[in-house]
Every structure is written in C-alpha cells, then in structure tokens.
Image (cartoon, rainbow, N blue to C red):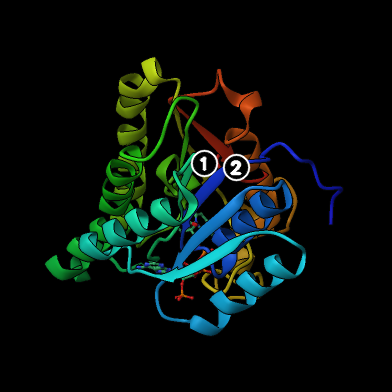
Amino acid sequence: MQAAMHRLVGKKAFVTGGSRGIGAGIVCRLAREDAAVAFTYRGRRDAAERVEQEIKKSGGQAIAIQADSGDPDALTKAVDHVAEELEGIDIFVSSAGTLLFKPIEQFTLEDFNHIVAVDLRAAYVGSKTVLKHMGKGGRIVFISSNIADHAALPMTSLYSMAKAGLDGLCKGMARDLGPKEITVNTVHPGPISTDANPEDGPYSKQLKSFMASPKFGKAEDVAGLVAYLVSDEAAFASGASYRIDNAFAA
Ligand SMILES: NC(=O)c1ccc[n+]([C@@H]2O[C@H](COP(=O)([O-])OP(=O)(O)OC[C@H]3O[C@@H](n4cnc5c(N)ncnc54)[C@H](OP(=O)(O)O)[C@@H]3O)[C@@H](O)[C@H]2O)c1
C-alpha cells in the first residue's frame, strides 16, 4: 500500500459499483485520502459490507447502499439519500458497468438496452441527480474503457459503443459545467485484474500480448489516477479521457 495522501479532507464522494473490482479500489483510495465515501452495489451485500467495515475500521466514513445503476429511480433515490446524509456531494464517480460480449449477430435489443442503461445512461442519470447537490469545485469521473479507443477484440461492439458514448457526454458536460468550476473526465482502463476480467481468465494470454509488458493492471492503478482527477490539483483537467492501459491502445 502506498503512503496515504490527504488531498480530500472534508470532501464527500459517491461511487457507483464500489463494492468490488475497480470501483472498490476507488472507494478505498478516496477514503484513504480522507473523503467520506458512499458507494453502491448491485446484489452482493457481503462484499459491500467488507469494504464498508474496512474503511470504518481505519477511522473513515463509508456508506454502502444497494442500487442498480440500470434502474434510474433506484440510482436517483440513492444519490438523494446520500446527499442528505452527507450534506452534499463533491465527487461523483460512475464505475458500475456491465461487461457483455457477443458477436454482433447474436446481440439482442434487450442486450442493447441493458448495456446502454448500465454503462451509459447511469452516468447521465447519476450526474443529473448529483448536480442538484454539488457546488463549485465539484468533480465528475466516468469509468470508460480503452476499448472505446481501440476495439482490439471481436464481440465488443455494444460495450465499445456505450463506453465511447461516455466520452461524448463528458465533453459536453465539461463545457456546460466549466463556469461552475466543476470538472468532468473519463478514465479508460485497459485489462485490470478483477472478478469480471481475472488475470488468469480465458482471454488473458491474448490481452497480455497487446500490452507493452505482459501483465494486467490492478484496481489501485486506476484508483490512483481517479484520486488525482478528483483532487483540487486537477482543476485544469476537464473534458478529457485518460488511458491507463500499459500501452495496449498505443
Ligand atoms: N476490469 C477491466 O479489465 C476493465 C477494463 C476497462 C474498463 N472496466 C470498467 O470498469 C468498471 C468496473 O469493472 P470491474 O472489472 O471492476 O467489474 P467487477 O469486478 O465485476 O465489479 C463490479 C462492481 O460493480 C457493481 N455493479 C455491477 N453492476 C451493477 C449495477 N447494475 N448497478 C450497481 N452496481 C453494479 C458490483 O456490485 P455487486 O458485487 O453487488 O454485483 C461490483 O461492486 C466497469 O464499468 C467496466 O466496464 C473494467
């Protein structure tokens, strides 16, 4: 574990999909930097409780809340509830995503709607609700994917589409919110070892062959970049995408 920095004292963060994987890495990192952190999960209460307890044991403030990012009402209620509990939200990170891969001939309209709902619409719905509670200097980050830049593998069409959509949303929002000194950015991870994409999984060898050195990243690698983007230091960074993928898409 790196030495903790304390850039987020007094900040209140809301992270979707924060109980496992990249989202959990972000939640723990923001808490270590002294933010109060609320995070959602979809169904695995056990994993969410573990993250919540770990943060509380270290003296931090954490709130785990069940809310499916694909359900706009549930997400809106969760954001409003947390904003009331924490008295505002300074940081919003949309990390929950659905990794659904099929050849284009096999995708259904239900698949399309599901991917758009979880990977793209949730970022819009979450941001719209968060903005009611966010003041000057707020920070918004969407977890996209390097597949938005470079679809190196087959079966990624809808995932790539939804993740690329986050970049468009980010750019337009950054323009709209600049006058309020709120920044909006997307982060494009490459292969990061999580339950959804384990380093020893079936695509591992192929994915490693695309990188500058044959290794997956860790959730903490992505979390470090996000922690910078949501800090006061990053006030001039807005409307951009940041790839973190060991040269995968270079
Ligand atoms: N891993 C990679 O290589 C990689 C690369 C590029 C981009 N990404 C992106 O990074 C994000 C996280 O991926 P990951 O690999 O860390 O996934 P993961 O290991 O499967 O973790 C998923 C987390 O999100 C939650 N979640 C899933 N669906 C949700 C929903 N509909 N509503 C609310 N929470 C939900 C899960 O909660 P439960 O435990 O309750 O299900 C869990 O906390 C995704 O947006 C993914 O597209 C991942």
Residue at horizontal 44 percent and vertical 44 percent from the top? 88
The CA span between labels 1 and 2 is: 8 Å
Residue at horizontal 31 percent and vertical 33 percent from the top? 168
Residue 75: horizontal and vertical position, in percent? 30, 60
Earlier-in-chain disc, 1 versus 2: 1
Residue 119, compared with residue 134, is above or below; it is below
Q: Quadrant of the N terminus?
A: bottom right
Q: Which residue is mark 1?
A: 187
Residue 136: horizontal and vertical position, in percent? 45, 25
Q: Which residue is mark 2?
A: 226
Residue at horizontal 75 percent and vertical 50 percent from the top? 213
Q: Is residue 213 left or right of residue 143?
A: right
Residue 84, compared with residue 180, is above or below; it is below
Residue 92: horizontal and vertical position, in percent? 45, 45
**How many labels, in total?**
2
Q: Quadrant of the C terminus?
A: top right
